[in-house]
Image (cartoon, grey):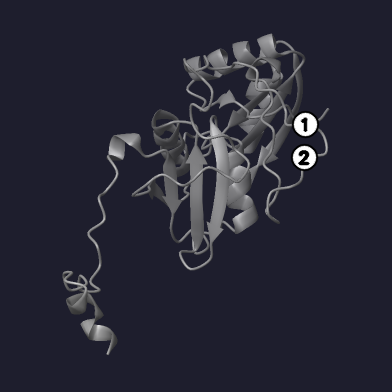
Amino acid sequence: GGGADWAAAGGQPPPPAGRRPRIPEDPGHVDTLAVVGAAEAGFDEAALEGFFCGLQGFVAFKANLRMGGGFAKFESPALAVAALGAAREAGVPAEMARSSMGAPPGAPPAGAGLLTPAPYGAHQPPPPPGAPPSGGLKRPRIPEDPENIDTVASVGANEAGFDLVSLEAFFSQLPGFVVFKANSRMGGGFAKFESPALATAAVAAAWDAGVPADMARSSMGA
């Protein structure tokens, strides 16, 4: 009988098939948010991914229908914590995940070939043209160099007391304003400026006025 094989070999009985206790990851090292019940809160998968895409340091979003939301991975734990604050302001039901989500296929492992961490804003070269898309998943978006972005994202402005009309009025009186695009799901919208420097100045002016604003992840089309 198969049950006696280990005894004949002089070994120990196999361990019981109980669950191996999982070693929880240090919460300070988790770079991923878990979103549960977003569907009930009125955010579908596309809206969730669109919301997290606009936040600083966004890496990937993985939908999970069973939990009515999914997981959003960021470049660092600090950026994930900042994203959590933005999500709560916008009414997105988010929490820190219990562990970090793996990087999307094709992404280099953290620190691969790097002796020192690259400074924030270091230009990441795009992948070679013709690289095959990763296993049927959506091709990961190549983040734009932050120094070239001319668009401001305002998330949770409604909760801060600014409706879409007053938000557009605020940005339109700033130097270099081009266009404002409202996004009611994120409780605010995007404001495009004539140059990255003017967009950076607009973020500072927004903060001074109590308007929640940050640099967008990419420039809005003209």
- The foreground one among 115 and 22 is 115
Which residue is located at x 77 percent, y 15 percent? 194
Residue type for callout 1: Pro
Q: Is residue 87 left or right of residue 123?
A: left
Q: Which mark is residue 128?
A: 1
Which residue is located at x 83 percent, y 27 percent? 222
* Mark 1 element type: loop
- Label 2: which residue? 131
Residue 30, how many percent across, how many down?
37, 39
Residue 72, how many percent across, how many down?
50, 46
User: Could you tell me if the residues under marks 2 and 1 are in contact, i.e. CB atoms within 8 Å?
Assistant: yes
User: Disc 2 and disc 1: Cα gap in Å?
Assistant: 6 Å
* Mark 2 element type: loop
**Which image quarter holds the N terminus?**
bottom left
Residue type for callout 2: Ala
For disc 2, the neighbor class at 10 Å (few under 14, some 14 to 19, many from 20) is few
- The foreground one among 177 and 77 is 77
State whether residue 90 is above or below residue 206: below
Where on the picture, by quarter, is residue 45? bottom right
Which residue is located at x 47 percent, y 34 percent? 160
Residue 130 visible in the current orientation:
yes
Residue 12, how many percent across, how many down?
16, 69
State whether residue 195 is above or below residue 138: above
Which residue is located at x 27 percent, y 39 percent? 26
Residue 146, how many percent across, how many down?
64, 20
Q: Is residue 99 left or right of residue 193?
A: left
